[in-house]
């Protein structure tokens, strides 16, 4: 059974930094594209950052220059480094792992970690 477990969420002041981690178990993430999504109260879940199995990254315009996504396949972990946090970044952050092989899509989600940016 594949599981993704996020950690690192916290209450932080505006301008602060956090690093989120997503540890996978039950599979190796080497062949998965990894993504970080967030969902604020009353809003739809949105993609924040993604990294392909080959290491290419894509960052949402709203966080570009402040957030960085990375992965360490040896640790079966994906990361989201968040700097210069703003109150608008407050949300539950979710990790996603996705792979497509032939006709089958593998799509897994973590349970989420809360990030609150407030003074």
Image: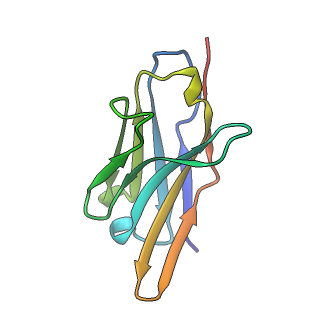
Residue at (49% x, 85% y) in the render: 104
For the N terminus, give its image quadrant.
bottom right
Q: Position of residue 27 (x, y in %)?
A: 45, 72
Residue at (74% x, 39% y) in the render: 42
Residue 75 placement: quadrant: bottom left
Taking depth in this image into account, of 78 and 86 the one nearest to the observer is 86
- Above or below, 31 against 15 in this view is below
In the displayed orientation, state which residue is furthest to the right: 42
User: Is there any visible trace of residue 11 in the rendered image?
Assistant: no
Q: Position of residue 76 (x, y in %)?
A: 39, 59
Residue at (31% x, 51% y) in the render: 57
- Above or below, 1 against 47 in this view is below
User: Is there any visible trace of residue 63 in the rendered image?
Assistant: yes
Q: Position of residue 17 (x, y in %)?
A: 44, 24
Taking depth in this image into account, of 29 and 67 the one nearest to the observer is 67
For the C terminus, give its image quadrant.
top right
In the displayed orientation, state which residue is furthest to the top: 119
Report the coloring of the rendering. rainbow
Residue 69 placement: quadrant: top left
**Number of numbered discs visible in the structure rendering:** 0
In this image, 7 relative to 60: left or right? right
In this image, 6 relative to 75: left or right? right
Q: Position of residue 107 (x, y in %)?
A: 53, 70
In the displayed orientation, state which residue is furthest to the front: 61
């Amino acid at each position: 059974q594949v599981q993704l477990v996020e950690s690192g969420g916290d209450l932080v002041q505006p301008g602060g930094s956090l690093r989120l981690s997503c540890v996978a178990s039950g599979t190796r993430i080497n062949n998965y594209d990894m993504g970080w999504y967030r969902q604020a109260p009353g809003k739809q879940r949105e993609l924040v950052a993604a990294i392909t199995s080959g290491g290419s990254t894509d960052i949402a315009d709203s966080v570009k220059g402040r957030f960085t996504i990375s992965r360490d396949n040896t640790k079966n972990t994906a990361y989201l480094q968040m700097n210069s946090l703003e109150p608008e970044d407050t949300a539950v952050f979710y990790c996603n792992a996705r792979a497509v092989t032939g006709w089958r899509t593998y799509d897994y989600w973590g349970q989420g970690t809360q990030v609150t940016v407030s003074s």
